[in-house]
Amino acid sequence: MRGVNRVILIGNLGKDPEVQKLEGNIAVAKFPLATTETFKDRSGKLISQTEWHTIVLWRGLADLAQKFLHKSSLVYIEGRLRTRSWEDKDGIKKYITEIVGENLIMLDKKTESTNHEQENPITDTEQDDSSSDSHDSINF
């Protein structure tokens, strides 16, 4: 991986992906992902800390998310950090940092109705950095 803003996460979806179709029939999906770290404190007590991340997927990955992912799905996501800003209705500047997913592996246990697509990582090879920057104003 190149760059310092690259991330790898393994976690569970907090809700079903929200998918929109943009001009040109470009799909974009957004969902919260929970990652949990478990460790023992000084007294030996087990402590769990959960962090929430906003995941954004484009094009083929968005279609895949709509078709196969649901609340509580376990996924591996590789991507990059993107921070964007906007002004709310009161003129106050707001910021959000999202993970733009570029690789996705579904980690849920297979069921009989599952395709072979779960066996292989899925990569959004159609996306380039210039095309995603033009979609910074997407709000769900």
Image (cartoon, grey):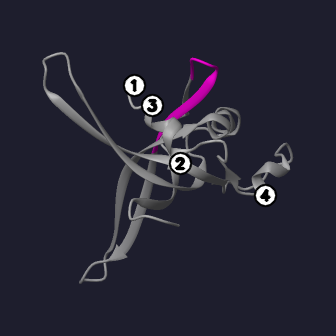
Which numbered disc flags the more N-terminal residue, 1 or 3? 3
Please name the residue that numbered disc 4 is placed on. 119
Instruction: Between label 1 and label 3, give the one nearer the viewer.
Output: 3
| Residue at 53% over, 67% down | 1
The magenta-colored residue range is 21-32
Q: Which structural element holds mark 3?
A: loop
Real-space Cα separation, disc 2 to disc 4, in angstroms: 18 Å
Q: Amino acid at mark 3?
A: Ser
Residue placed under numbered mark 1 in the picture: 139
Asked if residue 129 is positioned above or below residue 103 in the image, the reply reads above
**Pointers 1 and 2 in contact (C-beta within 8 Å):** no
**Location of residue 18 in the rendering, given as x and y in whole percent from the top left corner:** 53, 28
Disc 3 from disc 2: Cα separation: 16 Å
Q: Looking at the image, is mark 4 or mark 1 earlier in the sequence?
A: 4
Percent coordinates x, y for residue 32 in the rendering: 44, 41
Q: Which mark is residue 134?
A: 3
Q: Which mark is first along the chain, 2 or 1? A: 2
Residue annotated with mark 2: 101
Query: Is residue 89 a member of the stretch shown in magenta?
Result: no
